[in-house]
Image (cartoon, rainbow, N blue to C red):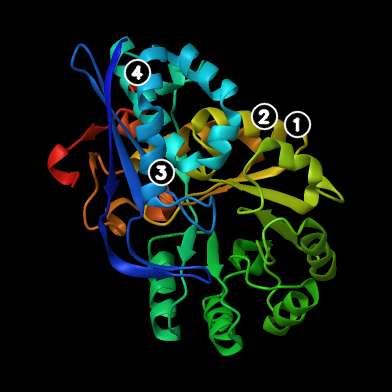
Amino acid sequence: MELQSVGVSALSIPFKVSFRHASAERAQTQAIWVTARSTDGAVGYGEGCPREYVTGESVAGAQAFVAAYRQGWVAGIRDARSLCAWVRANRAEIDANPAAWTAMELALLDLIGHAEGKPVEALLDLPPLSGRFRYTAVLGDAPPPAFAGQLARYLQVGFRDFKIKLVGERERDLAKVAALRAAGISPQSVRADANNLWSDADSAIGDLKALQYPFTALEEPLRAGDYAGMSRIARALDTRIILDESMARAEQLDSLPGEHKTWIVNLRVSKMGGVVRSLEFLREARRRSLGMIVGAHVGETSVLTRAALTVAASAGDRLIAQEGAFGTHLLERDVVEPSLMFGAGGILDATALRLGNSSGWGLDPSPDNVR
């Protein structure tokens, strides 16, 4: 495969409903879109989700990164081996621009797959993608009636696992817990995401105890990287801690205190810097017997959903949950066909969609939808 050109643009798609949590409120996607073309006319597409409060990236900065490096990629990347070599040789650059590189990597893997007539899993020496993937019902912050209505819809279609967003407003968070109790949902089926809400462990412990709902795990209750404080919360509340903003590179695993069973990592492909680095991280996490959640940024299109399936399939028995796969449940339109989204019971059936039998990511982008 000979790469001819790389194009990058912002990708902005309205949501059908806005989504709010402690760090941000969104009504449309915040992403970049990369188009990679080979000299024989094949095209590959990729997506990345820069987030200032997660990766320190902006959409403009991510676009600038792609523009700055694309000539080197055109000259040096020919196949999956040369792509992986670039990842190994440029770790610092990817650390600073993970979402930007993710968009480029996904486009290149798609393009190389088309050129070689192979799915991405075959390019990376992974088993073919197959099976059914079960997703978590993620509920954003909303007024009590809207929250209860959304919860009822999730229950109606058979979801088993739930994740709610806490915002630190006592009455608002108590109303969410009351809705969960009224629906008969066990705390062992519910994770709570605080999005780095509290400044210290004592405040977090006090507020969480006041909710009187023993969540099965808490995600990012303190500022990113406060492992000692989060470990203290885990002991005080007899729960587990999910690391998201606090865990983006494999070397950070060496900083975790206490027992490994305390920690779960939320592995989002765009945050980690692509599929190759996500798989590397996964191997290190498995070696430490850590639990894994394969998560998603709010507003991801089906391109990132497809990439996350590759990682989730590789997690094996360490996979605790999956998030995302909203497709046009949330987006006004998707940029590919089929739009990958959960169905009844939160299930996405990769076998039925034949994703493991098609070249690249097995998706057919619609140029009319990329604006």
Describe the element under mark 4 as helix, strand or loop.
helix
Q: Which mark is residue 283?
A: 2
Q: Which amino acid does label 2 sit on?
A: Arg
- x and y percentages locating residue 163 in the rendered image: 54, 63
Quickly name the residue at label 4.
74
- Circle 1 residues within 10 Å: few <14, some 14–19, many ≥20: few
Q: Which amino acid does label 1 sit on?
A: Arg
Q: Mark 3 points at which residue?
A: 62
- Going from N to C along the chain, the mark reached first, 2 or 4, is 4
Q: Name the amino acid type tagged 4.
A: Val
Q: In this view, does 3 lie above or below 92?
A: above
244 relative to 358 in the view: left or right: right
Q: Name the residue under label 1.
A: 287
Question: Can you tell which mark lies on residue 58?
Answer: none
Is label 3 in contact with label 2 (beta carbons under 8 Å)? no
Image quadrant assignment for residue 205? bottom right
